[in-house]
Amino acid sequence: YYSPYVGEEQTRVFAKLVRHYALEGHTDRMLQTPYELKHLKNPDFTAGLADWQVTAAEAGSVAPRRVPGFGFLQGRYINAVGDTTAWTKRSAERPNVLAQEVRGLQPGQLYSLRFFTGNYQDYLAGKSNPYRHAVRAELTGVQLVPEKCFQVQIKSNYGHVYGPFNRDNPYRMNYHQQVFRALAPTAKLTLSDWQSATEPGGPAGEELIWNFIQLQPYIPED
């Protein structure tokens, strides 16, 4: 009954797993994709900004920051998991950039990149408004699948209460997804708090928090 909480890929894979094991009675492993992902290092910023190449627009405009309850508001259930973030403060002069090499890709294989962003000052104020965050995630050396790429405005789960946030006052976030086909064993991921290479797209001084930079194999439709 949790299917409304997940994407189309997870719903499809769950149906395949039920058929493989419960209906057809197979005991062999259906999926060959690894459970432990090693394509990115420190993707949830649990070690601060280690393993990320950071280009700050101004002194102090990028920093690791613990945001209590951020993971729980996203829908994670384990206490304090997801509370470590990368914090950025937008400059009018140039973007803040975090970059990392993506490793261990299999050419021809489909992969997905997913992550969350939130407005930090809205979190501190205890009230947030829905809007599209002016950010950019760029993958170089891959082939995007445009129809599977999106950025959507979401709100915290009605059953996850943290501080002032609850079903009547949800915390608003953005959820990002890009699906791509690997062309080589490595690629480059670049995250920026500007909408494009030349336009900020949002107000200077806006503070955003980022985490759950998850990159994993994408299970295609039959």
Image (tube, rainbow, N blue to C red):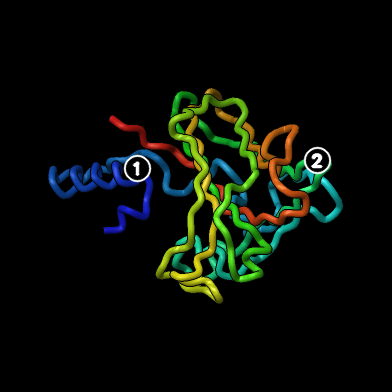
Residue 219 placement, left or right of 103:
left
198 to 95, vertically: above or below? above
Residue drawn where x is 73% and y is 41% of the image: 200
* Quadrant in the picture for the N terminus: bottom left
Where residue 129 appears, as percent x and y from the top left, is 57, 59
Residue 95 placement, left or right of 85:
right
The residue sitting at the bottom extreme is 163
The residue beneath circle 1 is 8
Mark 2 or mark 1, which has the lower sequence index? 1
Residue drawn where x is 13% and y is 43% of the image: 24
Amino acid at dot 2: Arg
The label number, if any, that marks residue 217 in the structure image? none
Which of label 2 and label 1 is nearer to you? 2
Residue situated in front as seen by the camera: 52 or 195: 195
The residue beneath circle 2 is 94
- Label 2: state its secondary structure: loop
Residue situated in front as seen by the camera: 13 or 38: 13
Where residue 115 appears, as percent x and y from the top left, is 54, 48
Specify few, some or many for label 2: CA neighbours under 10 Å numbering under 14, 14-19, or 20 or more. some
Where residue 126 appears, as percent x and y from the top left, is 60, 71
Residue 66 placement, left or right of 21:
right
Residue drawn where x is 68% and y is 63% of the image: 121
* Quadrant in the picture for the C terminus: top left
Specify few, some or many for label 1: CA neighbours under 10 Å numbering under 14, 14-19, or 20 or more. few
- Label 1: state its secondary structure: helix
